Amino acid sequence: MLSSEFQYDLKDDKIARHPVSPRRSAKLLHVPSKGDIIHGTFEDLPQYLKDLHCDGLWANDTKVIQARLYLRKPTGGRLEVFLLEPVNGVAELALSNKTSSSWRCLVRGGRKWTAETASLELAGLSLKVTPIDPSVGLVPEEGGTFQLTFRWIGAPSFGDVLDVLGRMPLPPYMQRDSDSSDSSEYQTVFARIPGSVAAPTAGLHYDDVLLDKLAQQDLSLNRLTLHVGAGTFRPLSEGSVSDHTMHAERCIITRKTLHSLASTSRRVATGTTTLRTLESLFWMAVIHYETGEFPQVLGQWTPYNSDRLTCRETHFDTYEDAMHYLLKHAPLNPVWDFRTQIMIRPGYKIRSVIALVTNFHQPGSTLLCLIAACMAPSWKDVYNKALQENYRFLSYGDGCLIEI
């Protein structure tokens, strides 16, 4: 299977650069496992889920941090810094630091950053950034990232600094700087735990009115957490899909999450990150049953046979069996924290959900591989239909409900 099989022609005018209002008025393309495509809006989602006899609607409650900073070099030139992840520990702790915080970052203009220091002062805040080890200097890591340390005066924590000085990290395909409206628009209404540098965009279609309508159908939102990394925008490597190295993202799971998953059977996931987390839990159960250990990072090809094309057989007959197993063995003290690198692509067997709510994704992306694994009809036929019907694509665009 070649990466070129996941390309399609996406014209610039099909890319949504701003969201619709209200959020629930976005179009929703319903793709049944059999039969004709149905055109609706997100206001139709409660009825669609009722018709599917859904007993659990899941979403990712990660919160996007204002991860893009525009600082000034001593020479007066602008330096753009994009925070990716803390050098050590987890985002919640790094954001709560009181005087300094070290992060792995992308730097635009880094080659010309000879002074290796930059700063920003605004609204009573003073922020300074330097290489994590000034004696060694600015050393690029594999992948072109840098380890930088931020120090500040005038704010109680680094999270407060970013709230004032940072900008929302809009995806590069939007081809615009973020503005004040993006601080709320590029955030789900149920965002809770800060740590993502990209939004779980399927959740952007939900608003309080829609959540109330879902609750009236006994479909109150169940939440889990996966912090979305910049790797979500990394295109597939050229050549075979099997040669692509998948990025790892951090999941946070509670006992309540596992109880809810073990007691339902007709679940629907909102977003690819939610589905990735749900499927990762199944494979964590498999690995522990086989080895007695829970890995810190769930490997990319864990679910597959040696050919990397088909899913391997497991001990668990159902997804619920795997969740009951995790309730007995998972290290929930009080939460379980791990990273997942699994790649979902055609040949993978989806076990956790009966349907997926998602956006329309970039050509040549790993997210499109995941969609292809979920969709009974040809994904290209569905995407071509959406383009013909003027659906809006990518992060601020319309969505689809895919029955699996």
Image: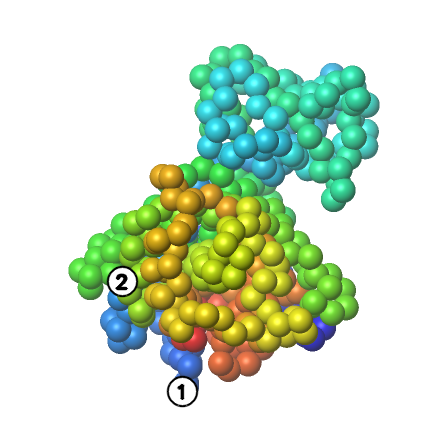
Q: Are marks 2 and 1 in contact (CB under 8 Å)?
A: no
User: Which quarter of the figure has residue 346?
Assistant: bottom right
List the single residue furthest toward the left: 216
The x and y percentages for residue 219 are 24, 61
Coloring scheme used: rainbow
Distance from the alpha carbon under mark 2 to that under mark 1 = 30 Å
Q: Residues within 10 Å of mark 1 (few under 14, many from 20)?
A: few
The N terminus: image quadrant: bottom right
Residue 401 lies left or right of residue 143; in this view the side is: left
Q: Where in the figure is residue 178, as x and y percent of width and height? A: 54, 40
Give the residue at x 62% y 63%.
301
Amino acid type, callout 1? Gly
One can see residue 98 in this view: yes
| Mark 2 secondary-structure assignment | loop
Q: Indicate the position of residue 170 as horizontal and vertical percent values.
A: 56, 45
**Residue type (three-letter) at the residue carrying disc 2:** Ser
Q: Earlier in the sequence, mark 2 or mark 1?
A: 1
- Image quarter in which the C terminus is found: bottom left
Graded by Cα atoms within 10 Å as few (under 14), some (14 to 19) or many (20 or more), the crowding at tag 2 reads: some
Residue 15 appears at what percent x and percent y?
56, 59
The answer to which quarter of the image holds residue 363 is: bottom right
Task: Judge depth for marks 2 and 1 and give the one in front.
Answer: 2
In this view of the protein, can residue 164 be seen by the observer? no
- At 20% across and 64% down in the image, what residue appears? 217
- Is 108 placed above or below 304 here? above
Identify the element where label 1 is drawn.
loop
Mark number for residue 263? 2
Residue matched to label 1: 35
Out of 287 and 78, give the one closest to the viewer.
287
Q: Residue visible at 40% across and 80% down?
A: 32
Q: Residue at x 62, y 72 (%)?
A: 305
